[in-house]
Amino acid sequence: MNKTIKSKENLKGSFSVPGDKSISDRAVMFGSIANGTTTVHGFLTGEDCLSTISCFKKLGIDIKVDGTDVTVQGKGLHGLSAPKKILDVGNSGTTMRLISGLLCGQNFNCTITGDASIQKRPMGRVNIPLSEMGAKINGRNEDGKLLAPISITGSSLKSINYTLPVASAQVKSAIILASLYAEGTTVIIEPEATRNHTEIMLNYLGANIEHNGTEIICHPVKELYGKEIFVPGDISSAAYFMVAGAICENSQITIENVGINPTRTGIITVLENMGADITLLNKKVVCGEETADICVKTSRLKGTVIEGDIIPKLIDEIPVIAVAAAMADDTTIIKDAQELKVKESNRIKTVVCELKKMGVDIEETDDGMIINGGKGISGAVCESYDDHRIAMSIAIAALVANGETTITDTQCIDISFPNFFKFIERM
Ligand code: S3P
């Protein structure tokens, strides 16, 4: 589906964005291995999370979806059953990596696959620590890299002490889930803090995971217990409107009830450093996760340097941050972001290529990009590369472009943000 977008000013309104994708995925997975019912409110019904539901149904879990309420009849840590079919994670890297960790310690075997993008994304990063724990994972081998489809032979696991070579919440979470089935205490050391929704939600359901500096210590537990989970709005979805509110003339937007877990708020820090007028109101803590209403007003932005340990805190927002940088005075440099190359698309290449088509002075580097901002954005015909975050970032650039922008293959937006264009129209 192609979408044509014209520039807009005077964006106004208060609204909430759909539920957090990382938290929605985890609610289904962890609810399935908890004892009793988990009721999830504000669930994201995007395609990635629906793929997670489909996988756990195949693993014998009864899951009912009613709007954004989801009821999971958990069967306890040892209640999953052997799937009769291949588990298909669709486009969801989170589902792929996390269920690999969860399934390698079961007493059955399974095969997991996903779409064309998933079949290119590295699985060695989870296989290495999980194999050290005793997991048996085989898969396609291309140039020495382990890729999906993968097959897992359920095995008994032992605990490990593991230093993550890359800052990845997906890898960390896969190890934490495997540790629930391993004898002894597993310790994971992170090079930089990554999103900690797994630790927060598992502890909320009865796990015993401690944080000590850069160490995550996973003590064994006998059971998890089903509970009610309220999912906040996804800051990664709110990010598009935060940037739109800052760069479109005469705008003022409030995005209500957004998750502001400090491991995810790099976008707020960076936009504030760039001079954006952002206010957080109505702060709360719900099910262990911090939330707030985020108010953004049109602001004159200036370039900045984004590097180091803030990168994992804004990894999914870099495409839309590049759009803000294109509208900012001076130069923005993004470094240490080589992880972008192994996302749904190679986001260093795809962001640079599409923003170049829109007349932005932007250059690819080995670990990020350099954007010489303040020179305006022009309408163009752009591709999504079937990457939801690229499609939505181009849509935000289109709001401030001279002339019309057409984006091809926008259906991928349903992966994380169903009805995205209706939100834009409503503003
Ligand atoms: C996610 C972690 C991040 C992020 C992804 C969701 C998660 O990936 O890019 O969209 O839910 O754990 P990495 O941890 O591999 O960087």
Image: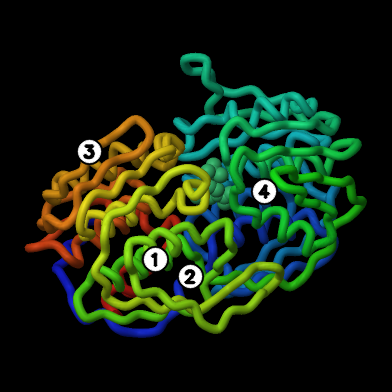
Counting residues from the N terminus, which is met first, the one under dot 2 or under dot 1? 2
In the foreground, 167 or 152? 167
Amino acid type of disc 1? Glu
Q: Secondary structure at mark 1?
A: helix
Q: Position of residue 149 (x, y in %)?
A: 55, 30
Task: Give the labeled residue for mark 3.
Answer: 363
Counting residues from the N terminus, which is met first, the one under dot 3 or under dot 1? 1
Task: Give the labeled residue for mark 4.
Answer: 58
So how many labels did they put on this image?
4
Amino acid type of disc 3? Glu
Circle nearer the viewer, 3 or 1: 1
Counting residues from the N terminus, which is met first, the one under dot 1 or under dot 4? 4
Circle nearer the viewer, 2 or 4: 2
Q: Are marks 1 and 4 in contact (CB under 8 Å)?
A: no
Report, in whole angstroms, how far the alpha carbon at label 3 lies from the one at label 1. 24 Å
Amino acid type of disc 2? Pro
Task: Give the labeled residue for mark 2.
Answer: 18
Task: Give the labeled residue for mark 1.
Answer: 272
Q: Are marks 2 and 4 in contact (CB under 8 Å)?
A: no
Would you call the spot at circle 2 few (<14 residues within 10 Å), some (14-19), or many (20 or more)? many
Amino acid type of disc 4? Lys
Circle nearer the viewer, 1 or 4: 1
Q: Position of residue 396 (x, y in %)?
A: 26, 63
Position of 288 compared to 379: left or right?
Answer: right
